[in-house]
Each structure stands twice: as C-alpha cells, then as structure tokens.
Image: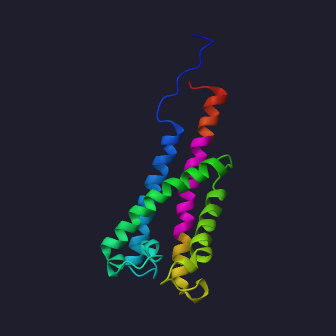
C-alpha cells in the first residue's frame, strides 16, 4: 500500500480542542473558585451571574459551582476560537497573551455589564493580581495545548507516522 496515506490514529483534532476547552474550563474554573474561597480574590466564578439580578444564591457555593459549569462550557468556545485564529503560532507566548486579552475583556471591557463588580482601578490589588494570574495560566493551558497538538498534526502530515 505505497500510494495510500496511513489512517491517523487517536482522536480527531477537533475532539482534542473540545477536551482541552472542557478540561481547561473545569480545572481553571475550580482553581478560581478555590482562590475565591480562600480569599485570594473578591471575585469568584459567579462573576458571570453579576450581569443579572438572580438573588443571593449566586454568591453561595451552588452559584459558584454553577458558574464554573458555565465557564467550562464557555471555555470550549474559547478553545475553538484559539484553534481557528491562533493555533499556528508556535510557543507559549501567544497563550500567555491570550490569557491577558481574556482578562482585559472580562475585567475592563465587560466591567460595566457586571452590576456588583467594582471598576478595575477600585479593585483590591490582590484581586487584580490573582485573577490576572489565573487568566494567564488558563490562556497558557488552552494556547499551548492547542498549539502543541496543531504542530504535532502538521508534523504527522508532513512526515507521516512511523
């Protein structure tokens, strides 16, 4: 079978992107909740509920974990956005900047949508640093994982599987 191309083994690239987004959201959303629980930040994952007036449950544990679930689902879309726009960029730096861009979008650009969220310059320093670091690590997780898989896929296409 010289002329035929070998079948690729393993998961398709889209499934890897989906799982990267799913687990990235679950892992980093849970870490965000832990940082909120231990008072490293005044803003927990329930930030997503601040755009609506939903009652006190949104600030309790059930609201935080429901927000982690929303963050996990949203993370799948964020991973596919990275895949289609930035996957060709090699290295970890684009993932780093992707996390910074996401943080800026959430805490600066979308800040007026979140009713109970203080303006960025009025937030405590520990909240700014903690959330920025969390978003950077999240961006690194998404970006580097997807870029690595993309490079591996390109290598296999170019040189074939052994």
Quadrant of the image occupied by residue 38: bottom left
Query: Quick check: is 145 in the magenta stretch?
Result: yes
**Over which residues does the magenta segment extend?**
134-150
Q: Residue at x 42, y 73 (%)?
A: 46
The residue positioned farthest toward the bottom in the image shown: 122
Q: Report the colour scheme.
A: rainbow
- Residue at 57% x, 80% y: name it: 112
Query: Who is closer to the viewer here, 130 or 50?
Result: 50
Q: Quadrant of the C terminus?
A: top right
Residue 154: tell me if it is visible.
yes
Question: Is 12 above or below relative to 140?
Answer: above
Q: Residue 82 location in percent, x, y?
A: 60, 53
Q: Compared to 118, does 68 lie above or below?
A: above
Judge whether residue 30 can be spotted in this image: no
- x and y, in percent, of residue 8 in the image: 52, 27
Give the main secondary structure of the magenta stretch: helix
Q: Foreground residue, 93 or 85?
A: 85
Using residue 30 as the reference point, say whether residue 2 is left or right of it.
Answer: right
Toward the front, the furthest residue is 53
- Residue 77 position in % (x across, y down): 52, 54
Q: How many marks?
A: 0
Q: Is residue 123 magenta?
A: no
Q: Residue at x 57, y 59 (%)?
A: 140
**Left or right: 110, with 21 as reference point:** right
Task: Residue 122: name its quadrant.
Answer: bottom right
Name the residue rendered at 57%, 42% in the picture.
149
Q: Is residue 93 above or below residue 48?
A: above
Q: Quadrant of the N terminus?
A: top right
Q: Which quadrant of the view contains residue 142?
A: bottom right
């Amino acid at each position: 079978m010289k002329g035929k191309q070998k079948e690729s083994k393993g998961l398709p690239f889209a499934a890897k992107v989906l799982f990267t987004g799913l687990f990235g959201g679950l892992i980093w959303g849970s870490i965000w909740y832990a940082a909120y629980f231990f008072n490293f930040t005044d803003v927990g994952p329930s930030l997503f509920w601040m755009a609506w007036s939903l009652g006190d449950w949104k600030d309790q544990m059930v609201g935080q974990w429901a927000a982690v679930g929303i963050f996990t689902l949203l993370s799948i879309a964020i991973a596919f956005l990275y895949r289609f726009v930035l996957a060709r960029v090699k290295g970890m730096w684009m993932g780093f900047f992707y996390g910074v861009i996401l943080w800026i979008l959430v805490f600066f650009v979308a800040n007026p949508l979140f009713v109970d969220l203080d303006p960025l310059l009025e937030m405590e320093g520990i909240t700014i640093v903690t959330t920025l670091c969390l978003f950077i690590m999240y961006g690194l997780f998404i970006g580097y994982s997807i870029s690595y898989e993309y490079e591996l896929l390109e290598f296999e296409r170019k040189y074939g599987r052994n």
